């Protein structure tokens, strides 16, 4: 189902972009932003303010970071790419899809357990996700950076097989994963801490013990090689990283300080790339 949804998104992107010319920046009045859904509330507000200040329209496509990178590759379009993890910057540069070393830092993301606000299943730790009969949701690790971090978290703590028995759905983006908890569709999700701040009346944040977190993520922002105007791409990035943009990220609960991020996991690695292990693929084949 997720593959079909991704193909539909790609076709929609190509149709949207069909009328876009390939001229230089002097004659374009819009920019296309491929935005990982881990950024959704902050980037929607930043894009609106950028439009108001500059008169330049921001066409923003939200989704899973891996799926968006695939759309950039297939459509050969895009002025800005904002995944939820540097994993996809590494992949994008390897494939020649991103301007090399154009990526800049936006904010940190801390893995956490997110439950419906009343936490009906009484979940208080990572080990609780292995309890029989629990309904757990997570991001699809094939296309969503959150899913990669979730699988890595479970593998590093020896919980992959036990928790995967309880995983009832894998969502195609961060926002869809968060909605599983907000709408009480599952007992818990493996998510980002920031999800709670998106909708505190509907979602509760359960911290994961610091020693159990092997890696924390950060949001990068980069420029696709297909940009029609690299100066315009940089202008938008500068706006995102300006005091105004940073304040909006803070408002929605994102962390921009390395020191504060490491308080949640002092020994964790930051960023890098994670390859799904054979253990995970073997579990899928066994189902």
Image (spheres, rainbow, N blue to C red):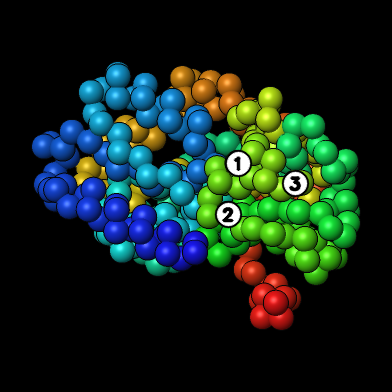
In this rendering, position of residue 268 left or right of residue 224: right
Question: Residue 202 falls in which quadrant of the image?
Answer: top right
Q: Secondary structure at mark 2?
A: strand
The residue located at (53%, 20%) in the rendering is 247
Counting every numbered tag in the picture gives 3
The residue located at (16%, 47%) in the rendering is 20
The front one of 172 and 45 is 172
Task: Give yes or no for contact between labels 2 and 3 (Cβ–Cβ under 8 Å).
Answer: no
Task: Give yes or no for contact between labels 3 and 1 (Cβ–Cβ under 8 Å).
Answer: no
Residue 157: x %, y % from top left? 84, 60
User: Which numbered tag is attached to residue 171?
Assistant: 2
Question: Residue 169 falls in which quadrant of the image?
Answer: bottom right
In the rendered image, which residue does mark 1 sit on? 179
Residue 182: x %, y % from top left? 65, 37
In the rendered image, which residue does mark 3 sit on? 188
Residue 270: x %, y % from top left? 67, 49
The residue located at (43%, 30%) in the rendering is 44
Task: Give yes or no for contact between labels 2 and 1 (Cβ–Cβ under 8 Å).
Answer: yes
Residue 217: x %, y % from top left? 63, 47
In this rendering, position of residue 104 left or right of residue 10: right
Rate crowding at label 2 as few (under 14), some (14 to 19) or many (20 or more) other CA atoms within 10 Å.
Answer: many
The front one of 252 and 199 is 199
């Amino acid at each position: 189902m997720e593959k079909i949804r991704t193909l539909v998104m790609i076709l929609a992107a190509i149709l949207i972009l069909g009328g876009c010319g390939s001229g230089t920046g002097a004659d374009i009045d819009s920019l296309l932003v491929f935005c990982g859904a881990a950024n959704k509330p902050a980037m929607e507000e930043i894009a609106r303010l950028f439009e108001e200040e500059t008169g330049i329209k921001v066409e923003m496509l939200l989704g899973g970071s891996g799926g968006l990178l695939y759309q950039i590759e297939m459509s050969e379009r895009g002025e800005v790419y904002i995944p939820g993890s540097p994993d996809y910057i590494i992949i994008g540069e390897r494939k020649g899809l991103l301007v090399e070393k154009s990526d800049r830092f936006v904010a940190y993301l801390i893995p956490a357990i997110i439950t419906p606000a009343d936490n009906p299943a009484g979940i208080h730790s990572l080990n609780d996700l292995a309890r029989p009969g629990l309904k757990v949701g997570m991001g699809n690790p094939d296309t969503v950076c959150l899913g990669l971090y979730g699988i890595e978290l479970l593998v590093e703590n020896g919980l992959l097989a036990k928790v995967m028995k309880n995983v009832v759905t894998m969502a195609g983006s961060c926002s869809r994963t968060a909605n599983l908890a907000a709408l009480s569709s599952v007992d818990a999700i493996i998510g980002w801490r920031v999800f709670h701040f998106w909708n505190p009346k509907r979602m509760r944040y359960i911290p994961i013990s610091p020693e159990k977190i092997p890696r924390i993520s950060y949001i990068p922002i980069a420029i696709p090689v297909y940009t029609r105007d690299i100066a315009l791409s940089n202008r938008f990035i500068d706006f995102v990283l300006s005091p105004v943009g940073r304040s909006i990220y803070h408002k929605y609960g994102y962390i921009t300080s390395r020191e504060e991020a490491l308080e949640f996991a002092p020994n964790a690695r930051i960023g890098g790339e994670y390859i799904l292990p054979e253990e995970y693929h073997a579990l899928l084949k066994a189902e």
